[in-house]
Amino acid sequence: MTHVESLPPPRTGIGPIGWLRQNLFSTWYNALLTIIATLVIGVVLLSIIEWAVGSARWGAISTNMTLFMLGQYPREQVWRVWAVIYLLALLLGLSWGVWQTAVRGFALIAVGASLVFALSVVNSSVWPIWIGVAFAIGLGYLGGRHVPGMRRVAVVGGVLSFPIGLLLISGLTRLNFLPQVPSNLWGGLLLTLVLTVVGNLVSLPLGILLALGRRSRLPVIHYFCVGYIELIRGVPLITILYMAANMLPFFLPETVRPELVVRAMIGLILFEAAYQAENVRGGLQAIPRGQYEAAYALGLNPILTTLFIILPQALRLVIPALLNSFVSLFKDTSLVAIVGLFDLLRIGRSVLAQSDWLGTHREVFAFAFLVYWGINLALTYGGRRLERALGIGQR
Amino acid sequence: MSPPEEPIIACEDVHKWYGQFHALRGISLSVQRGEVVVIFGPSGSGKSTFIRTLNRLEEHQRGRIVVDGIELTNDIRNIEAVRREIGMVFQSFNLFPHLTVLQNIVLAPVWVRRWKRQQAAQSAMQLLERVGIPEQAHKFPGQLSGGQQQRVAIARALAMQPKVMLFDEPTSALDPEMIKEVLDVMIELAKSGMTILAVTHEMTFARSVANRMLFFDGGVIVEQGTPDQIFNHPQHDRTKLFLSQILKH
Ligand SMILES: Nc1ncnc2c1ncn2[C@@H]1O[C@H](COP(=O)(O)OP(=O)(O)OP(=O)(O)O)[C@@H](O)[C@H]1O
Ligand SMILES: [Mg+2]
């Protein structure tokens, strides 16, 4: 047998110049395209930057920042919003300490964001509060990492944080130190986020129930769920919001008169639940029959089987679709302006009506654009990290 | 000799249809405690269908099935009571992929038998010792070989302390070198006095521990007898033909 020498592998690294040549200038028309695209992007970017640092009147944003964030929320009660932010920051840090990589993406983004916020308001009195938020996350992390038994605290805290947060924001008539803030005063980003979080939190379990009901063998339940899902999915969200805002009171007893925010929220939830149901159904269909059979053969009843065997697997499979719907709802909340609520975007239009800031359309909408986009970027990035962490070691 | 006991499984004239297709055509069988019964026969003869009627994974439409004194009817409480007494092992393992090996085993004892979690975990570890893979307790099923997964499935079924174990071709999805490790566990189980009904074409298992063999064809029991009778003096031509086919290799 002849001896064959071992050769070094062929070089694959081509360096930045090589990459450019291979991808952007491989042929004359590719090169032409690259040059034209660069020119167009350059011209657009230049004019945007010129406007942003030159003629733009950012005062429209900075003087109205609190309005953008909170709407008409009473200024002397703002500490309650801060309390909620600190509560969430602590919990986020705690979960980061307990679950490590799964939550790290969200946590790092939140730390980064609070530092950026602190910098951007460095000449007001608010910046130390934002620095404090970053510290709260760090503190939570240390607690979750080093104090035993924090897993349970994180789970229970996570579950309780939503009712507590909502209570802090809305208050109670009976409590002196926590007077009620009527929900028609909620506005801006606060309202947008409350609608998003509550909407998603309620619609997911509803959607799960609808998806399970759709697979039920009892005809009444099955057809109710199918009918509901197909009805809702056949109508635009705006229609449902109008109906929820204007017609809901007719279906409720005289004594129950929910505020407009609550009615709009119900509309969003009813809408979103139908879509989440379809997402979950996709996951349920992917579970092989053998999983049910194994569970039944062990004596598990259908409820235990669904709870411990089927749903955990089905939900894990559709996490990307669920996150996608979370983000959709976040953007869709801007439609509540149509029934008269002051979400972030609607506040923007009210700023345009202030006599000092007439004609600042570009500034206002650029700001709204950045807020929506930034939050979505953070959600998507954090969500992808979560997905990757959950996928490890299973299946 | 002790007086003849009540059979743990009694079937009378069991029929099953899939739509128009008559899959079981009158099966009568009684199995005593501690008996090891091997069921074999050609593909499509109704072997799986039959043992799946015993824990109501399939519903029978005519005849009676009584397990440990409980008749299988539409009453869900009876069905769940029977399922608690019968363990089942599937061809495709059907472990729960999102749970660790230990969690797979303790789930039913904790939620169905209402054992304390610690007690359940202890007995799960003993079962894993018994099937020879205690070191895999904290892995996920996807990280195990086929033979190891099937042994976990056996441990999971045993954790409910069943009175009867059903096996449906437990080794036919396995590579040859893994078949033995599963058969060894089954043989040990049979020798320990467990009542077993196994659909299998592993004749080593039948020869070493079976008390009785049933030959299924066309939805009926064509012939039954001890391994000696079946292997050495089969009565029916169909049995002879089938045996000659599977024993050739
Ligand atoms: N869910 C079902 N619907 C319709 N027909 C079925 C169903 N399950 C089984 N059958 C039919 O019933 C007959 C018996 O099937 P069964 O699975 O019991 O056979 P088997 O003896 O276990 O065969 P194998 O050795 O291939 O597993 C087959 O003809 C099969 O096609
Ligand atoms: Mg079969």
Image (cartoon, coloured by chain):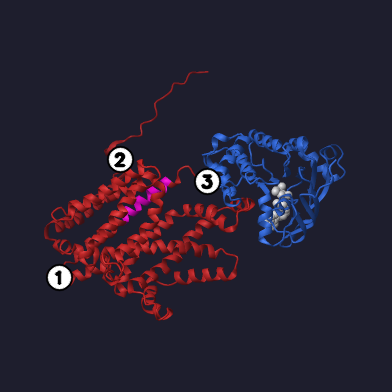
Chain colours: A red, B blue
Position of A384 with respect to A210 (left or right) is left
What residue is disc 1 on? A358
The mark found on residue B99 in the picture is 3
Front residue (pair B209, A290): B209
Q: Residue placed at 50% from the left, 53% from the top?
A: A312
Q: Residue placed at 36% from the left, 57% from the top?
A: A161
What residue is disc 2 on? A19
The mark found on residue A46 in the picture is none
Mark 2 close to ligand 1, CB under 8 Å: no
Count of residue discs: 3
Residue B222 falls inside the magenta stretch = no
Mark 1 close to ligand 1, CB under 8 Å: no
Does A119 sit above or below residue A339?
above
Q: Earlier in the sequence, mark 1 or mark 2?
A: 2
- Residue contact between numbered discs 3 and 1, judged by CB atoms under 8 Å: no
Q: Position of residue A6 (x, y in %)?
A: 43, 23
Front residue (pair A363, B167): B167
